[in-house]
Amino acid sequence: MKGRILIIEDEPGMRLGMSHFLSSSGYAVSPCEDGADGLAAIEKGSFDIIITDLKLPKYDGLSILNHAKKISPETGVIIITAYAEVKTAVQAIKDGAFDYIAKPFSNEELLITIERFMKFRSLEAELSRLRESVTEKTGFENIIGVSPAMKDVFDRISSIAKTDVPVLIQGESGTGKELVANAIHNLSLRKDKPCIKINCAAIPENLFESELFGHEKGAFTGAAEVRKGRFERANGGCIFFDEIGDMPMGLQAKLLRVIEEHTVTRLGGNEPVKVDVRGIYATSKNLKDCAAAGKFREDLFYRINVVPIIIPPLRERKEDIPYLIEHFLKYFGDKYAKPELKVAPSAYNALLSYHYPGNVRELKHALERAVLLSKNGLIDFKTLPDEFSAQGIGCPQFNNLPVNTPLQKGIVFLEKQMIMNALKESGGKKIEAARKLGISRKVLWKKLKEYSIE
Ligand SMILES: Nc1ncnc2c1ncn2[C@@H]1O[C@H](COP(=O)(O)OP(=O)(O)OP(=O)(O)O)[C@@H](O)[C@H]1O
Ligand SMILES: [Mg+2]
């Protein structure tokens, strides 16, 4: 069966003729003889196409069209008109009909119009599939990434979002930990309940307990009212502990107890209150090292590290950079009403090769600034922050140095690279290379020996 067609036509000969022809062409056909029957059929059945006469007893073709568009917007409506009604037919197209055919028409004409609609719809479906697969390829919700590391992150999120297991998100500052935490909450069964965030690095130690657990009236000086803590406010939802590595040790023990017993007791209170919350934790520190150094409780670490999600720094997944650039340019282009932005090759290269100590956040801010400074839609080198021009443009290898390289080793590396570049540029002529480097021939010769450069 090629598709389901509803025919609404009061003239018996036409109705029968079309029904017969379309059935024999492979369609399932339901014929109706007036507008009221037609409307009832639309409400009951589901059709790929409705072919309706304009002039009908009871309801006319335009009412059928409007009704069909409301009930089943993806159904195609083809209007049959008499010659004199062409104006109305044009109105019908404006109202969302797929097309009209004027009487008298041949079976072939009818079939061509029907098949054009079927083709149109399958193209539309394909387009939306393609759109979906593009977002599948480059991201997840609003998290952009195509690198294997990011694909692992997406996989993890999908497989644990709907469970209640604790998640520990690890990554340097600006890698997107909060974005991932939000995605987990939004994809979880708790999405309609709150996701309460607590930044452990920003709350003074003496306020921590009342923030988390709340307090009764008069629990301490200044506690004039009863106050619910964040655990109670997050009840039914998630609680997101950002920078969990910065939580004071004393409080870690209390947190562990809450996690194990699912109850909190307000400061100054003695009735434990049941809480049902899912914990999501993020850290830019290596908690295992913190535990080994006695700065983080090992038992808490094992409790929260059930599902680790590790987001690598941006410099270790450079293949994500072009997609992030595109994403942020679109975002800021829309935000600041600067459409059709172009990036000059020099700026693009600098964006690709920079080492991003501040990770995605740094790229995002750089592009926001660049969009604002851009003139005539061009993002060029001048619009980028100084760090991008200070980097070793002539020696991109420098950007591949791990951030924790000792300074001395990094300087030696850079010096060696610069000497080799100067030699290359001067075609191996040492006098010229020395001049380029602003050093004497003797110093150059000494360095060549020191670094065993041929
Ligand atoms: N993969 C990504 N796709 C799109 N935007 C991202 C991505 N990663 C990070 N961002 C954006 O970069 C900024 C920083 O992200 P986020 O706040 O989640 O980082 P973080 O790891 O929590 O940083 P911090 O440790 O400093 O709190 C946000 O504006 C976020 O939207
Ligand atoms: Mg954060």
Image (cartoon, helix red, strand yellow):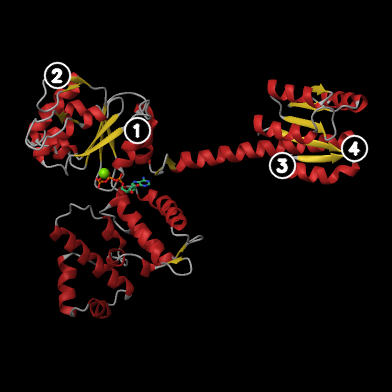
Please name the residue that numbered disc 4 is placed on: 105
Please name the residue that numbered disc 2 is placed on: 271
Q: Can residue 27 be seen in this view?
A: no
Please name the residue that numbered disc 1 is placed on: 184
Q: Can residue 129 be seen in this view?
A: yes
Task: Report how far apart the C-alphas of labels 1 and 2 lie in the structure.
Answer: 32 Å
Q: In which quarter of the image is the C terminus?
A: bottom left
Choose mark 4 or mark 3, whichever is in front: 3
Q: Quadrant of the N terminus?
A: top right
- Residue occupying the far front of the picture: 224
The tag earlier along the polypeptide, 4 or 3, is 3
Task: Report how far apart the C-alphas of labels 3 and 2 lie in the structure.
Answer: 64 Å
Q: Residues within 10 Å of mark 1 (few under 14, many from 20)?
A: many
Please name the residue that numbered disc 3 is placed on: 95
Residues marked 4 and 3 touching at CB (< 8 Å)? no
Q: How crowded is mark 2: few (under 14 residues within 10 Å), some or many (20 or more)?
A: few
Helix, strand or loop at disc 1?
helix
Choose mark 3 or mark 2, whichever is in front: 2
For ligand 2, give the image quadrant.
top left
The amino acid type found where label 2 is placed reads Glu
Q: Residues within 10 Å of mark 4 (few under 14, many from 20)?
A: few
Choose mark 1 or mark 2, whichever is in front: 2
Q: Pinpoint residue 27: horizontal percent, then vertical percent.
A: 78, 25
Drawn side of residue 127 relative to residue 258, left or right: right
Q: In which quarter of the image is residue 354?
A: bottom left
